Image: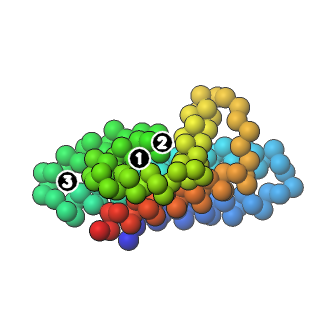
Amino acid sequence: MRDIEIVRYQKRLEGLFAHVKLMTDNAELQSHWARYLCILISGFLEVSVRSLYGAYAKGKSSPYVANFVERNLERLQNPTMEKILNLAASFSPSWEAELRAATDGELKDAVDSVVANRNSISHGQDVGITYVRVLDYYKRVNRVLELVERHCAQ
């Protein structure tokens, strides 16, 4: 089961998506919101990955080991799919292999695009991200998180 922090973040994002969807008459405003949503999705991904693996360590190891893992997870920033795969490999090589196979293609591309767009947006660059595209990224990021969550539930 997802941590309450993850669920709150998810509900906030879904509320914003519903709000922005109603702005169909103003494409420019919807485009600005799409950039903001992309940044939030990147944060959601980062918080969720940390939380899922941190909770796993807390539930499966001594407090000292869990503390070590949680401190190391704090260093995770801008989690590209490769960073997530490397993190999964730190827990289990089979998790990494399964996750790599399951995310190859569209899921990997969505995670990497969210992070790349987030970095471009935060550095003031213009990105051509739309509401429809960012919504698709969000759905795919959630699928990646479900895969991570499935491993951590073992």
Mark 2 or 3, which is nearer the eye? 2
SS at badge 2: loop
User: Mark 2 vs mark 3: which is more N-terminal?
Assistant: 3
Q: Where does residue 122 sit, x and y in percent of width and height?
A: 58, 33
Amino acid type at circle 2 is Thr
Residue at 19 percent across and 62 percent down: it is 60
**What number of labels is visible?**
3
Quarter of the image that includes the C terminus: bottom left
Q: Is residue 59 above or below residue 26?
A: below
| Residue nearer the viewer, 52 or 37 | 52
| Residue nearer the viewer, 109 or 34 | 109
Q: CB of mark 2 within 8 Å of CB of mark 1?
A: yes
Quarter of the image that includes the N terminus: bottom left
Structural crowding at the residue carrying mark 2, measured as other residues with C-alpha within 10 Å and reported as few (<14), some (14–19) or many (≥20): many
User: What's the distance in space between the residues labelled 1 and 3, CA to CA?
Assistant: 18 Å
Which residue is tagged 2? 80
On screen, residue 135 versus residue 88, left or right, reads: right
Which residue is tagged 3? 66
Residue 109 in sight in this render: yes
Residue at 75 percent across and 60 percent down: it is 21
Amino acid type at circle 3 is Ala
Which residue is tagged 1? 84
Structural crowding at the residue carrying mark 1, measured as other residues with C-alpha within 10 Å and reported as few (<14), some (14–19) or many (≥20): many
